[in-house]
C-alpha cells in the first residue's frame, strides 16, 4: 500500500498541473516515467478532465473529480483494484467538509479496503493544510480513534 500512496501523491500533482493548462500528453508521459522510476513497474497514465488511470503490475489506480479548486470536493475519489485476490481492493472517497460535531470544518475522506485478511473502513478528517486531523478505523467490527498532528 506504500507504493499506492506514492502513486496517489504523484497523481494529485498531475491534477494540479492539468488545472494549470499544461498539455496532458506531456503530463502523462512525465508521470509514467516518474512512477516507473519510483516503483520499478510499468505504468500507463491517461488523464482527461480531472480523471486518471494508472496501470501497474500490482493493479490499477483510477481517480475522478480531482480537477477542482475545492480542496475538499465531495465525490472526488480514487480506487485501487488489485491484480489478484491476494492484493485486495481499496477506495478513497471525499465525503465533503464536515458542518458540525467534533470534526467541524475538517474534510472527511472514507477509505475502504477489501483484503484476504478482512475488510477495513477508515474515516479521515483533516484540516486544509493537512497538518492535523483524526481518523477512525473499523476493522472487523472493532473501532479505533486517533488524533494526529504534523509539525
Image: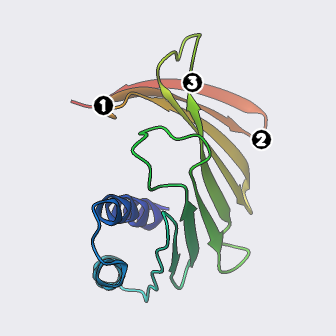
Give above or below for 140 relative to 103: below
Packing grade of label 1 (10 A; few <14, some 14-19, many >=20) is few
Give above or below for 25 relative to 129: below
- How many tags in the picture? 3
Q: Which mark is residue 145?
A: 3
For the point 48% across and 55% down, the residue is: 66
Q: CA distance from mark 1 to mark 3?
A: 17 Å
Of label 2 and label 1, which has the lower sequence position? 1
- Judge left or right: residue 32 versus residue 108: left
Residue located beneath label 1 in the image: 131
- The quarter in which the C terminus is drawn is top left
Query: Which of the two marks, 2 or 1, is nearer to us in this view?
Result: 1
For the point 53% across and 85% down, the residue is: 57
Packing grade of label 2 (10 A; few <14, some 14-19, many >=20) is few
Q: Quadrant of residue 138?
A: top right
Disc 1 secondary structure class: loop
Q: CA distance from mark 2 to mark 1?
A: 29 Å
For the point 43% across and 59% down, the residue is: 5
Residue located beneath label 2 in the image: 140
Q: Nearer the viewer, residue 73 or 113?
A: 73
Image coords of residue 131 (percent x, y): 30, 31
Amino acid at each position: 500500500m506504500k507504493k499506492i500512496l506514492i502513486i496517489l501523491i504523484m497523481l494529485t500533482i498531475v491534477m494540479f498541473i492539468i488545472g494549470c493548462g499544461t498539455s496532458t500528453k506531456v503530463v502523462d508521459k512525465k508521470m509514467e516515467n516518474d512512477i516507473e522510476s519510483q516503483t520499478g513497474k510499468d505504468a500507463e497514465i491517461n488523464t482527461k478532465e480531472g480523471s486518471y488511470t494508472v496501470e501497474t503490475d500490482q493493479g490499477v489506480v483510477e481517480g475522478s473529480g480531482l480537477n477542482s479548486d475545492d480542496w475538499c470536493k465531495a465525490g472526488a475519489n480514487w480506487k485501487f483494484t488489485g491484480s489478484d485476490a491476494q492484493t485486495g481492493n481499496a477506495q478513497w472517497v471525499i465525503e465533503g467538509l464536515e458542518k458540525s460535531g467534533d470534526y467541524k470544518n475538517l474534510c472527511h475522506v472514507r477509505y475502504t479496503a477489501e483484503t484476504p485478511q478482512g475488510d477495513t473502513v477508515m474515516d479521515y478528517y483533516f484540516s486544509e493544510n493537512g497538518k492535523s486531523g483524526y481518523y477512525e478505523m473499523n476493522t472487523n467490527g472493532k473501532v479505533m480513534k486517533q488524533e494526529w498532528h504534523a509539525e
